[in-house]
Amino acid sequence: MGPAPFRATTSSPSAGDLAHTVDLERGTVRVDGGEPRDTTSRVTHVFWRVEGDRWLVHRHADLPPADQRRS
């Protein structure tokens, strides 16, 4: 199994030298040789502008909460 493509939905407001994105990353993963599984992660990135370039200075990812409407 090769690299899995991920799709992201992004919101990216910026203020001065700071910018952030809030993404949902979706892809297919395989853990410890198991079966491939679809996955979704909530991801936040924080970027700092240094000499005109954006540098990633923080990344956080977690699993979205379960959909309470399905219980």
Image: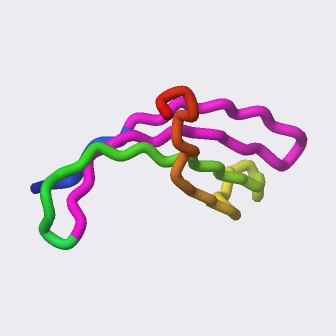
As drawn, is 27 to the left or to the right of 44?
left
Looking at the image, the residue that sits furthest to the right is: 16
The residue nearer to you, when weighing 60 against 52, is 60
| Magenta highlight on residue 12 | yes
As drawn, is 33 to the left or to the right of 67?
left
Looking at the image, the residue that sits furthest to the top is: 69
Q: Looking at the image, is 65 positioned above or below residue 3?
A: above
| Magenta highlight on residue 36 | no
The residue nearer to you, when weighing 7 against 34, is 34
Percent from the top left, x then y, of residue 41?
48, 48
Percent from the top left, x then y, of residue 23?
57, 39
As drawn, is 48 to the left or to the right of 6?
right
Looking at the image, the residue that sits furthest to the bottom is: 32
Write the residue at 66% across / 30% down: 11
Q: Which stretch is magenta?
A: 7-31
Write the residue at 28% across / 43% down: 38
Percent from the top left, x then y, of residue 40?
43, 43
Looking at the image, the residue that sits furthest to the front is: 71
Write the residue at 57% across / 34% down: 68
Write the residue at 64% across / 49% down: 44
Percent from the top left, x then y, of residue 60?
62, 59
Q: Which image quadrant: the N terminus?
A: bottom left
Residue 61 quadrant = bottom right
